């Protein structure tokens, strides 16, 4: 699948740097620069919904999405209320992205057991489908049950539901029961395999493929690579990402890093990350090189980008990077 089948949507990860109350003019400029989407996340900073709610009022040209909200950290009825509220605030402009997140965020930080992630995500998606009809929901799902809940607001337009997916099971769920998949920490070549699984599970039908792409438009390659290794190590030692990259075939390249990390030798783990892996997973170089690399993701099946600017070069200003990567640049 290529992005020609679905209209390509260039997006940016939010929140942007600085306090939320200062973002209005920046969001307007994003739209002026040709960005069509903003995608929030939820880990240890802003929650996923508040930045989008503010953007809904400030800049009507932007589509709003979550990439992602963890399936575990909101009770079902509360989750449905948050989704319905955003969909009501921005009819036709909101997409809800749901994922399992990770054991670190769910279990260590939120005190919620990280068990049966596939079933949990599937059940939350199914419950939201049921709840957003406006009908009363009394149902037993595999991981929870709901007795007699009915949403008090019914959005004018039901938002698409996207599923954050890494390996084959969740990718197939995204194609079969979701409106698309949200992917990250992968190379353009990896997209071909990942998007193919989603499309196959959808019976050959088109599905949205949203990719968070980590970018640093700097030609200071040595500094960028060394700084990027901290991000690579932080993510790829999380069990779900470890398994993902083994599935993608990076077991041999990343094995020494995983072994050193498990042994508690962080310095050796960083040193063991090959430059080739960094270059696969982090887009860097001149703005023109970065734009061409981002296009490779699109050519291989990404329909929507959510660029995440990494502050790897201390001489590169965030907004300079945003402008240099914009659809209107070049």
Image: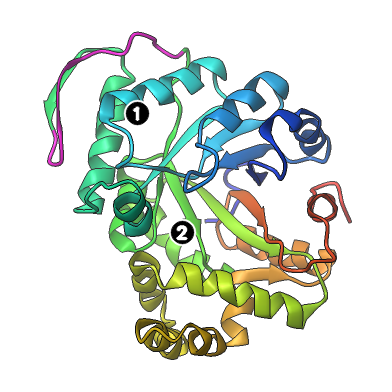
- For the point 85% across and 66% down, the residue is 315
Whether residue 211 sits left or right of residue 75 in the image: it is right
Where is residue 321? Give x, y as percent: 80, 56
Q: Is residue 189 visible?
A: no
Vertically, is 250 above or below 124? below
Whether residue 313 sits left or right of residue 157 in the image: it is right
Whether residue 256 sits left or right of residue 64 in the image: it is left
- For the point 33% across and 39% down, the residue is 73
Snapshot quadrant of residue 135 = top left
Instruction: Label 2: state its secondary structure.
Output: helix
Vertically, is 126 above or below 226? above
Where is residue 286? Give x, y as percent: 83, 69
- For the point 81% across and 77% down, the residue is 220
Q: Which residue in the structure is indicated by mark 2?
A: 195
Query: From mark 2 to mark 1, how far is it between C-alphas?
Result: 27 Å
Q: Residues within 10 Å of mark 2 (few under 14, many from 20)?
A: many
Q: Residue 252, labelled with which disc?
A: none
Q: Residues within 10 Å of mark 1 (few under 14, many from 20)?
A: some
Q: Is residue 240 magenta?
A: no
Q: Which residue in the structure is indicated by mark 1?
A: 79
Where is residue 13? Give x, y as percent: 63, 46
Q: Is residue 147 magenta?
A: yes
Question: Mark 2 or mark 1: which is in front?
Answer: 1
Residue farthest to the right, as pictured:
330
Whether residue 79 sits left or right of residue 269 in the image: it is left
Vertically, is 325 above or below 272? above
- Read off the magenta span: 141-155
**Which one is earlier in the sequence, the residue at label 2 or at label 1?**
1
Frontmost residue, 21 versus 183: 21
């Amino acid at each position: 699948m290529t992005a020609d089948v679905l209209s390509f949507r260039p997006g940016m990860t939010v929140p942007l740097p600085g306090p939320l109350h200062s973002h209005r003019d920046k969001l307007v400029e994003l739209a002026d620069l040709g960005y069509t989407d903003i995608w929030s996340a939820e880990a240890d900073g802003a929650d996923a919904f508040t930045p989008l709610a503010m953007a809904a009022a400030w800049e009507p040209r932007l589509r709003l999405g979550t990439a992602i909200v963890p399936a575990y950290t909101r009770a079902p009825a509360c989750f449905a209320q948050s989704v319905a509220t955003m969909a009501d605030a921005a009819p036709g402009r909101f997409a809800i992205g749901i994922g399992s997140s990770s054991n670190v965020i769910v279990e260590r930080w939120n005190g919620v057991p990280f068990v049966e992630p596939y079933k949990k995500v599937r059940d939350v998606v199914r419950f939201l489908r049921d709840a957003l009809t406006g009908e009363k929901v009394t149902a037993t799902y595999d991981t929870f049950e709901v007795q007699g809940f009915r949403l008090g607001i019914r959005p004018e337009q039901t938002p698409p539901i996207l599923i954050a997916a890494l390996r084959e099971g969740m990718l197939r769920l995204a194609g079969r029961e979701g409106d698309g998949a949200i992917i990250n920490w992968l190379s353009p070549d990896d997209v071909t395999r990942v998007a193919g699984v989603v499309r196959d599970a959808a019976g050959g039908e088109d599905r949205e493929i949203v990719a968070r792409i980590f970018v640093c438009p700097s030609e200071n390659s040595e500094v960028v690579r060394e700084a990027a290794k901290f991000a690579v190590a932080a993510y790829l030692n999380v069990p779900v990402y470890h398994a993902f990259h083994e599935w993608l075939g990076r077991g041999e390249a990343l094995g020494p890093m995983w072994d050193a990390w498990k042994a508690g030798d962080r310095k050796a783990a960083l040193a063991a990350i090959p430059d080739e892996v960094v270059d696969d997973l982090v887009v860097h170089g001149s703005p023109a090189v970065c734009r061409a690399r981002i296009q490779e993701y699109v050519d291989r099946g990404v329909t929507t980008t959510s660029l995440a600017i990494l502050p790897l070069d201390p001489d590169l200003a965030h907004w300079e990077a945003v402008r240099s990567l914009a659809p209107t640049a070049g």
